[in-house]
Image (cartoon, rainbow, N blue to C red):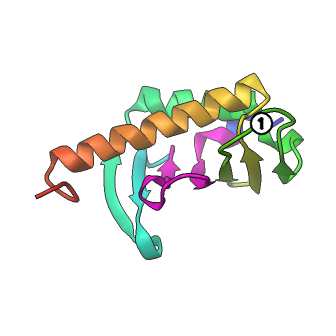
Amino acid sequence: MLCSSLLAIMRIEFRTEGDMSPGLRRNLIVDTDEKTVAIVGAGDSIAGTAGLLGEEAGELERLMEAANLSDLPSTYLSDGGSGRRVGYTISFTTPGRSRTVQLASPVDYPRVRELVDRLNRLWEKMMEIRLSSGRGGAS
């Protein structure tokens, strides 16, 4: 399990891929130390950034610790589900560790699923902010 003292400084990268339209792919970078979140666009360029509230950063740190991604294999495919599949890549970096885990939907582990759901909601929130500010929205 990750040590709580390491979670105070964390960078989380979250990507989705697979059976979804290219416009719906998600790529997000969160820095819980700097309390920032960024949407990454085409060519890995930053498409938008926003501040992350202290409680949001704390919640992500809690979810990361509860998900305990260090105990999962680097690539984890679920047993269930059929039809459209979505892949998730979660990378995290702390001062003492870096790790990347690739998952396929549906995510079997409830705590990992909760983390994926929270990261998806954060991406949606960032898109709402981006669109409401007039950047990247329809003309």
**Vertical placement of residue 22 versus 50, above or below:** below
Q: Say whether residue 89 is visible.
A: yes
**Magenta residues?**
6-32
Q: Which residue is the extreme one toward the top?
A: 110
Which of 92/75 is in front? Answer: 75
Please tell me whether mark 1 sits on a helix, a strand or a loop: loop
- Would residue 59 be found to the left or right of residue 100 on screen? left
Q: Quadrant of the N terminus?
A: top right
Residue 99, given in percent of the width and then of the height, sits at 76, 55
Q: Which residue is the extreme one toward the bottom?
A: 43
The part of the image, by quadrant, that contains residue 105 is top right
Residue drawn 84% across the image and 54% down it:
74
Residue drawn 74% across the image and 45% down it:
104
Residue 39, given in percent of the width and then of the height, sits at 40, 56
Q: Which residue is mark 1?
A: 3
Dot 1 crowding, Cα within 10 Å, few <14, some 14–19, many 20+: few
Residue drawn 62% across the image and 32% down it:
115
Q: Is residue 73 magenta?
A: no
